[in-house]
Image (tube, rainbow, N blue to C red):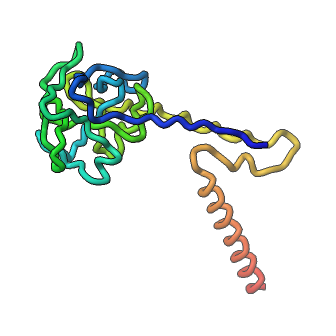
Amino acid sequence: MAVATAVTMVAVPTVLSAQSTVTVDVGGNGELGEFLVAGNGMTLYIFTPDELGVSNCTGGCATAWPPLTVADGETPTLGAGVSGELSVITRDDSSLQVALNGAALYFWQGDSAPGDSNGQDVNDVWFVVDSAGAIVQTPAAAPTSPAAPVAAPAAGTTGNAGLISSTGTTPLVVLLLLVGAISLVFVGRRAGQTR
């Protein structure tokens, strides 16, 4: 029996036609809160190794992280709630990239829907930014609860469950048992030699 699987590919438009207006707007998600998105709702990122007014993401980097670009003569616009200044910088390939407060803006190839932020913290150099252009920090992971200790054997049974602990003392207990066994062997041999 053959099963048909539909795969939906989402193209992230990075160059908008001269008739359209590029808008850098506020979007977000439940994990990171509010951050910048393009007019199509896709998340925008900054690359911290960039210099203000200069993109250092070229070649394979620009394939994975497509720049938000505009056509020659097009002026990007800010959406409601976005502060700062939009500008256009000329990339090494002569394309025109949108920048906020001088920081070049990029998409991430791993995002497929508005609100995705799969590029956040990639290699500790890619980040979403808030409406003022400041890096949005990823919330710290919730601490995991410590493992519960293993229960001691039930009354009338045997077992080594009482030696196992969630605090990592098992190796110490094993070491002490080995030292004790070696000592008994040594003492027994010595006692046999002195008789």
Q: Which of 23 and 121 is in front in this view?
A: 23
Q: Nearer the viewer, residue 50 or 13?
A: 13
Name the quadrant of the N terminus. top right
Residue 41's image quarter? top left
Numbered label tally: 0
| Relative to 187, 49 lies left or right | left
Residue drawn at x 27%, y 53% is 59
Provide residue 114's location: percent of width, then percent of height: 41, 26
| Relative to 184, 42 lies left or right | left
Q: Residue furthest top?
A: 80
Provide residue 9's location: percent of width, then percent of height: 48, 37
| Relative to 116, 89 lies left or right | left
Residue drawn at x 26%, y 25% is 130
Provide residue 143's location: percent of width, then percent of height: 48, 33
Q: Which of 72 and 57 is in front in this view?
A: 72
Asked if 96 appears above or below 73 in the picture, the reply is: below
Residue drawn at x 29%, y 47% is 62
Asked if 63 appears above or below 134 in the picture, the reply is: below
Residue drawn at x 36%, y 44% is 122
